[in-house]
Image (cartoon, grey):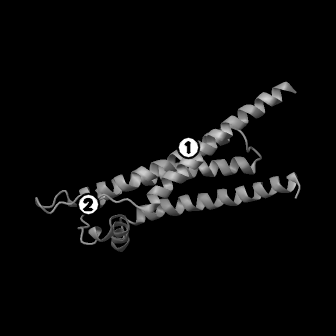
Amino acid sequence: MTSFDQADRLRRFSRMMAMLTTLGMLVIAAAMIAVFFIPDWTRNLLLARLGQAGQGLSLSPGNLIAAAAITAVPVGVLLFGLWQVRTLFLNFADGHVFTLASARLLRNFAGSVLAQAVLGPVSSTALMLAFTLNNPQGTRQLVITLSSQDYLALIVGGVLLAVSWVMVEATRIADENASFV
């Protein structure tokens, strides 16, 4: 396969991934808004985030507002990261692969993935505190959740961050070599 074929394959793949990322961002944003208006979806979110401890929680308007505010933080970080990777794919589709801009976009995406590793457990704990804060003394709950997804986000974010540093160094070397010619 020639380098032209490889470049064309990267361009087509990157365009497809940019479209898929855009679609994902729209679906995630819409779903996170809808989840606080559809009680069954809210219950499913709580069960997914808190396990069985989230089953009997009251879905009062105040609790839903608190949950939406708490959930907005990791979702906002997620959407920021997806926006960065979408822009990265668009750069690749335009043929801008080893550039400082691409390395920065990858670094920003890596940072959002790493942040998700921390925000997952923190937001789950905050959700449980918000839902049980008004409970009588002795019935308030503190839950700390850790999952393999949090660990995976930590590792993948670290790998992506290292790759972004490699891209910066590769760009620096390429620019240095180009100045000799």
Q: Nearer the viewer, residue 139 or 96?
A: 139
In this picture, residue 115 sits left or right of residue 96: left
Q: Which element is circle 2 on?
A: helix
> Which residue bears the numbered disc 2?
63
Mark 1 burial class by Cα count in 10 Å: few <14, some 14-19, many 20+: many
68 and 181: which is toward the camera: 181
Q: Which residue was labeled with disc 1?
A: 108
Q: Earlier in the sequence, mark 2 or mark 1?
A: 2
Q: Residue 13 in the image: x percent, y percent?
A: 73, 59
Quadrant location of the N terminus? bottom right
- The residue at the far bottom in this view is 40
Q: Residue at x 34, y 58 (%)?
A: 124
Q: Disc 1 marks which amino acid? A: Asn
**In this view, which residue lies farthest toward the top?**
180
Residue 29 lies, in percent from the top left, at 48, 59
On residue 159, the disc is none
